[in-house]
Amino acid sequence: MKRIITIFTICLAAFASANAQELANFNFGGRMAPVVSPEIQGDSVTFRFRADYATVVKLSGSWMPNPYGDTIDMTRGANNVWSVKIALPAPEIYTYNFVVDGVSVNDPQNILVQRDGTRFLNMLIVPGERTENYTEAQHRGTVSHPWYDSKVLGINRRLTVYTPYGYEANPKKKYPVLYLLHGAGGDEEAWISMGRTAQILDNLIEKGLAEPMIVVMPNGNANQQAAVTLNIPTTPQPDWRKMQEQYANLPEAERNRAMNSYVVSLCEEIVPFIEKNFRAIAKPEARAIAGLSMGGGHTITASNLYPQLFDYICPLSAAGSATPEQVATLKKAGVKLYFLACGNTDFLFEGSKTLDKTLTEQGLDHIFYVSEGGHVWANWRLYLNTFAPMLFKK
Amino acid sequence: MKRIITIFTICLAAFASANAQELANFNFGGRMAPVVSPEIQGDSVTFRFRADYATVVKLSGSWMPNPYGDTIDMTRGANNVWSVKIALPAPEIYTYNFVVDGVSVNDPQNILVQRDGTRFLNMLIVPGERTENYTEAQHRGTVSHPWYDSKVLGINRRLTVYTPYGYEANPKKKYPVLYLLHGAGGDEEAWISMGRTAQILDNLIEKGLAEPMIVVMPNGNANQQAAVTLNIPTTPQPDWRKMQEQYANLPEAERNRAMNSYVVSLCEEIVPFIEKNFRAIAKPEARAIAGLSMGGGHTITASNLYPQLFDYICPLSAAGSATPEQVATLKKAGVKLYFLACGNTDFLFEGSKTLDKTLTEQGLDHIFYVSEGGHVWANWRLYLNTFAPMLFKK
């Protein structure tokens, strides 16, 4: 027994050294007075940052009127801890960073970090009704990153897949599937990180508001095997103009396939991969497709090229359009939900209004959900939280 | 067709705007002259960082003689881009950051970032024989994060699970399992991030050097549901001293269970969860356990409390020990590989030498692998790359 106690003593010593992974880290932490940041108190939030030699320290945050230009000056206090206390912004997930003598710096006290493209930014989660589904539920689904071999694109490609809580405990149950597509500059990690997909689905399912479902988040960049964080060289972007010339004389169906290789891979490779490797219900009424911006374009293209595949179609702030003929074909195919969403200051709002008009003219029942604001994740989280409860209910 | 071309033009416009996810990001990037960092050229590497108003900019890197104190001064050049060119360190994965007027700043040009506890640090991968298995293989396994309900610990807990390439394509094949445990300050993401487990296994399996296997990386902090990045409150650490008093009069077996609740959960809950939910071979000869530092202690404790469970045992830089009686029991149980590893300057080296002696005295065939250096991830990657090919071969 003495030896077992010795083990504990060593573990205890290791434990005591403040999140230390490597030996040298054992010297870190503990020396400086603890700095807490951000600290929400009532209707205010305080940001703090220690900078011994700085002249000007500012706070930059996505809640500011001009999120990409505005800053708020911070004030030097005891121990060179700079701080600023501001009115708490409305409930939402925001990003922020400090600007120290002109240099962007993350908040070292805040473990919550999002990656937007190539930038890492701290998160500020303001609690409230708007964000109640954006934080961890009691029970959580599994997030996995399988790879599928794409013959269409000639590469092995990474997916993000969410399976709901209970998937492992109910090995005979089959689930419907939402295919959820990111925008330009995003990748297969965008919806799970900035979009809070796992948290939103966990909460909606836990509350009985949404059907337990699988969510598949592919990488929508046809030239990419995986997110840039994986350090796999990305092949050059295809030259769309050249492709248009090259395929100009092909029959339309062939040209569409050639020009839309990612959507072809999604519908002819990813959907079968998921239905083979996960317990998915392989029927149109158990398939939904949604996407934001470029992914909204992919959503519309998929519904145009494969009108029978998905019964639930949700283009969000979409870069895309459909002809009256394409909408008529969709209507005939028996779409169960067409949920079109856009912000009223989005630079793509006109396109969404045009699509709404075409849908109305063709008599395709649909929802045109118009929110405040623009082309931002605050809207895309809201849309997912809004349409996910409508899926697979009919 | 015209409308389809319009979709492409919109997508193209979005694509062109340099990794932009939200509209406002469209204004970012492109304005400043491109800064490349780090740039490896032949036997040198150059770091660059733009700081318009800084007085002193330094480079801090884990390859320096004292990685936690040494820095190298950088020099201001055109456009306020500070830079320093140094001799390329020996092949390995290093971490680094800039120190701008006393403030630690990550390299905004480098997408490769590791989290060590609560700190985010940039990675420098120096290519060479030592690191050839640390970068992406041609074909990659699936990394997933399932959750298991622990009755022993009373919480729902997150795991990291690696399944090898081919797992999905061979739905009848069953695989052996390596349970791979992190150290103090780590969590279920440590081995996959700092340890490069997926890359190492992908490469070893692709080269035919290791058996295709499942790797399970649990969270070894009994009070934690998941890594701190998930924003789930962590319960306070148990007070080991109080527990020792509290359980002092229990029979030894009961006391061991009470004091080792995480190891009990690992062996009685995680192992069955994996063998139920993955295509795992449920036999001792198809189970391996390995762990670093505190996880090395967990490895030894698991082999002491459950001598029949694992045929492959690999304590790495371990905080733990075993009695002659425990080793004798293990020998009797028929261990197939006992791989003990430690750095020759590790603060736990004496403990490993003692364990080596006990193993020798008890006649348990084993490998005592002594490497240069200390209690660092460079060694733990090396150990994994070294012992993984020895698993499940007998």
Image (cartoon, coloured by chain):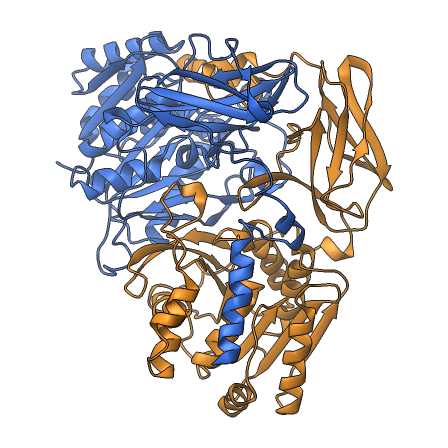
Chain colours: A blue, B orange
Q: Is residue A129 above or below residue A174?
A: above
- Is residue B141 positioned above or below B372 on the image? above
In front: A59, or A133?
A59
Instruction: Determine whether, in the image, residue B182 is placed left or right of residue B256.
Output: right
Q: Answer left or right for A224 relative to B248.
A: right
When asked about the image quadrant of residue B99, the answer is top right
**What x and y, as percent, mark residue B350?**
69, 72
Residue positioned most to the left: A394
Instruction: Provide residue B108's location: percent of width, then percent of height.
Output: 64, 27
Instruction: Report which quarter residue A80 is drawn in.
Output: top right
> For this rendering, which residue is in front, A262 or B13?
B13
Q: In this view, does B64 lie to the left or right of B219?
A: right
Residue, x 83% and y 43% (percent of image)? B88
Compared to residue B317, the image places residue A382 above or below, namely above
Res B236 seen here: yes
Q: Position of residue A128 (x, y in %)?
A: 26, 26
Count of numbered badges drawn on the protein: 0
Most foreground residue, A298 or A152:
A298
Image point (56%, 33%), residue name: A223
* Residue B212 seen by the camera: no
Quadrant assignment for the C terminus of chain A: top left
Observer-nearest of B65 and B18: B65
Where is residue A288? Give x, y as percent.
Answer: 27, 35
Residue B106 picture quarter: top right
